[in-house]
Image: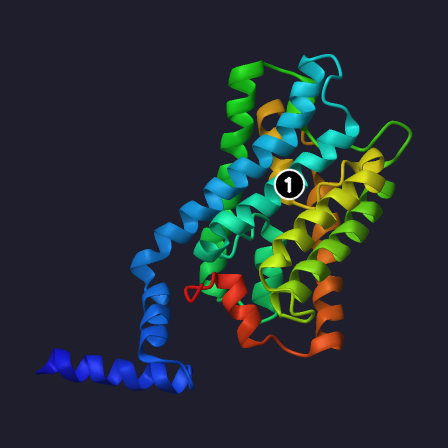
Amino acid sequence: MAERMSDADERQGSGRQHPGLSTFERTSIRQFDDPRLEWRRLFSEFFGTFLLVAVAAGAVVVDAAASGAVGRVASVTAPGLMVMAIILFMGAISGAHLNPVVTIAFALRTDFAWVRVPGYLIAQFAGAAFASVTLFAVFGPQAHDGATLPGPGFSDAQSFAIEALVTLGLVSTILGAASGAQNIGPLSALAAGGYVILAGLWAGPVSGASMNPARSFGPALVSGDYAHLWVYFAGPMLGMLVAVGVAYVLRGRGDPKARRAAEGNPLG
């Protein structure tokens, strides 16, 4: 009897939180919010970040190992295409953040629960580290293990400014697509992946266009070179904070569409 009353209360509570949804839809949301399923979200972030860093750092490593056979254009295009693929095949599980600054941006926008942030960050950094270790095991030390570093002739300060700028654009793109601002739906994968390619094409020679502390952390951990790592933490964090402010000016506080995108959409 107690269980029946608990179920009824839960159904009523779900109805209050998600008015206008069918019983099936409310049940799907309850299942998605079930903390017992958090491991799926965390594995999704780990696996997705692993794939992203394996491609982003791997393009640099393979290019060095193959005497320039990959090339710069392909090296900056590959991560963008990987982002598109990950969002399309796994975005509904965790939201496919793949990047600590994206997770924090969603939380600051109230589209993502702060209690989930530490787990996501750990999964992302762990996935990046595992990808870098895998590359090192296969290819040995090559091209600073795929690290993002200031380009020849560019200072840390210049790289910091560029990382902040390109991350501003990336996070603005992601937050806008997640909110349905342009009603692009599943094409948000194209928006995010396309922007990664665009940023890499023009900003890559300056800073490597990381825009992602986890992507930069993995190779730095393997190579043991942390001299420039602050650039790839501080720059993206600054760009993200400005992007959150811009999003507030453009759209106000977060909305239900953005929340479903940030946490994954169990309704499909």
Residue 251 in the image: state x and y as whole percent.
70, 77
> Which kind of residue does numbered mark 1 sit on?
Leu
Mark 1 surroundings within 10 Å by alpha-carbon count, few (fewer than 14), some (14 through 19), many (20 or more): some
User: At x 50% / y 58%, what residue is drawn?
Assistant: 117
On-image quarter of the N terminus: bottom left
Q: How many marks?
A: 1
Q: Is residue 13 above or below residue 96?
A: below
Q: Is residue 17 left or right of residue 102?
A: left
Q: Is residue 136 above or below residue 3?
A: above
Q: Residue 105: which quarter of the image?
A: bottom right
Residue 130 in the image: state x and y as whole percent.
49, 31
* Label 1 residue SS: helix
Q: Is residue 47 left or right of residue 227?
A: left
> Is residue 236 in view from this perspective?
yes
Q: Residue 69: which quarter of the image?
A: top right
Residue 222 in the image: state x and y as whole percent.
58, 25
Q: Residue 230: which quarter of the image?
A: top right
On-image quarter of the C terminus: bottom left
User: At x 65% / y 19%, what residue is drawn?
Assistant: 62
Q: Nearer the viewer, residue 31 or 249?
A: 31
Please give the residue where the numbered disc 1 appears in the rendered image: 81
Q: Nearer the viewer, residue 90 or 247?
A: 90
Residue 217 in the image: state x and y as whole percent.
61, 36
Q: Is residue 261 above or below residue 213?
A: below
User: At x 69% / y 25%, what residue is drawn?
Assistant: 60
Q: Is residue 82 left or right of residue 247?
A: left
> Is residue 156 in view from this perspective?
no
